[in-house]
Image (cartoon, helix red, strand yellow):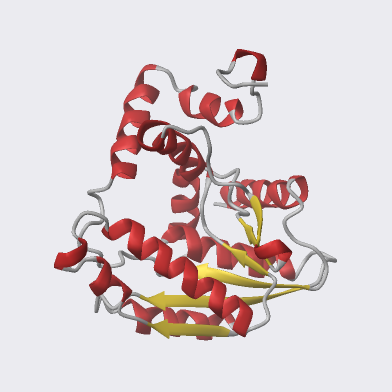
Amino acid sequence: MAYCKKEIRRLVGKAIHHYRLIQDNDRILVGVSGGKDSLSLLRLLHERSKRVPVHYELLAVYIDLGFSSGRTEILKDFFETTGLPYHIELTDIGRRANSSENRKNPCFLCSWERRKHLFDLAHRFKCNKIALGHHKDDIIETLLLNIFYSAEISTMLPLQTLFKGKITLIRPLALLEEKKIERFAREVGLPFGASGCPVSGKTKRKEVKEIIEALEKKNRRVKGNIFRSLSNIKLDYMLWKK
């Protein structure tokens, strides 16, 4: 446990320093979905704020999608124990995203609506940054999703500035693998659970994850090599016009 926690802290610190994710006097809205990743992110940023000389404030935000999963009360109790300021936004995003009129694209609408709510809440609470719980596996999977289904080479960024600098997205878990985050979340007793989404586990992302897992069984370096390729691009060997 001690080694796991130390290693996770190290990699979060490395990501924050390398990508310059957090500066003095930042007000950071932490998007909490109730899963292991976002709860671990909140815990790690809170711990870090107590031991580093950089001063920043955190606001935990949970957007209730309206699935009646019971997660809202659980997360409210958890937020109370942290002592951090928090906000719970009640919505019907889940119902609308999974309506009969939107059967083909529930994930897109849900993601778009949640992101819009986060931007609005960041503005309302005067937060200049939004921290999201995406990790190394998410970045790798997004690259392949965009290649397979959007015909482009792109992925999530650890640091992304939007709206002419008014809001910055940060992903402090960018260097952490999902399995390490899950181990950490279990060992420190975080109350993570499923969202109640009816299409959870039936997505293209899940399919890509399974492809990577199958390749890793033959070569355990596959995942790391895909991640490193994102900073090792040979432009002279790409089909693009100079």
Q: How many marks?
A: 0
User: In the displayed image of the protein, which residue is found farthest to the front?
Assistant: 241
User: In the displayed image of the protein, which residue is found farthest to the top?
Assistant: 237
Residue 7 visible somewhere in the drawing: yes
Is residue 232 found left or right of 34 in the rendered image? right
Residue 52 coordinates in the image, percent (x, y) = 80, 64
Is residue 206 found left or right of 23 in the rendered image? left
Task: Relative to 68, say whether 137 is above or below.
Answer: above
The answer to which quarter of the image holds residue 110 is bottom left
Give the residue displayed 44% in from the left and 44% down from the top. Answer: 179
Residue 215 coordinates in the image, percent (x, y) = 36, 22
Give the residue displayed 55% in from the left and 83% down from the top. Answer: 86
Residue 190 visible somewhere in the drawing: no
Q: Quadrant of the C terminus?
A: top right
Give the residue displayed 30% in from the left and 79% down from the top. Answer: 92
Is residue 118 found left or right of 68 in the rendered image? right
Give the residue displayed 62% in from the left and 79% down from the top. Answer: 123
Residue 197 coordinates in the image, percent (x, y) = 25, 64
